[in-house]
Image (cartoon, rainbow, N blue to C red):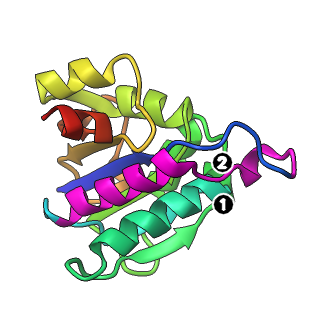
Amino acid sequence: MRRLMLLRHAKTETDAPSGRDQDRRLDDRGHRDAAQIGDWIAAHPPFPEAVLVSHAARAKQTWDLAWEAMKDRVPAPQVEILPELYGADPAQILESVRTATAPADPRRLMLVGHNPGMHEAALMLMRGGDPDGAKALAHNLPTAGLAILDFDVKDWEDVAYRRGKLVLFVSPKLLRLG
């Protein structure tokens, strides 16, 4: 069994001072939401053993704030910054998942990236599972939204479209409503 956690970066400023999209940083809500989703992850094992993070400032900040909220309660995962996750489409995201073996071959993997690729990948990977989560996820993977999928496979290279069971979809907004 392999568990994939797809986390979209938290809410950002509209424009970066540099004018470059990848330099956009989290706004105040983004800071709160990233910490809230990290706190939620820490309270809901199992935890990611490896985390692949886009090199964009907002993705790195999202991970850093989430980790800060969970680090005292969760074993430290292996973290790798992957430039190819910035602007990745579902095929690129799937390739990143399939090659997530070195050096420790994690059984639980988290990706921190961007829409539309993360949302499209979640929809394409999902086949069944939590019907309420699937309904909520159908229209959007919101900022700081987390889709958790289980795959009944032995290796990451066997992960494929329509093979994942949606375990849960959660977002800061859903946590506030719940």
* Residue 78 vs residue 176, the one in the foreground: 176
Please, what secondary structure does the residue beneath circle 2 have?
A: loop
Looking at the image, tell me whether mark 2 or mark 1 is earlier in sequence order. Answer: 1
Residue type at numbered disc 1 = His
Q: In the displayed structure, would residue 149 be above or below residue 103?
A: above
Say whether marks 2 and 1 touch (CB < 8 Å). yes
Q: Residue at x 19, y 28 (%)?
A: 133
Where in the figure is residue 79, as x and y percent of width and height?
47, 74
The quadrant where residue 128 appears: top left
Q: In the displayed structure, would residue 72 be above or below residue 176?
A: below
Residue type at numbered disc 2 = Tyr
| Magenta-tinted stretch | 18-42
Please, what secondary structure does the residue beneath circle 1 have?
A: loop
**Residue 38 lies within the magenta run:** yes
Question: Crowding at label 1, few (<14), some or many (≥20) Cα neighbours within 10 Å?
Answer: many
Label drawn at residue 86: 2
Label drawn at residue 26: none
Q: The N terminus lies in which quarter of the figure?
A: bottom left
> In the figure, is residue 121 to the left or right of 49?
right
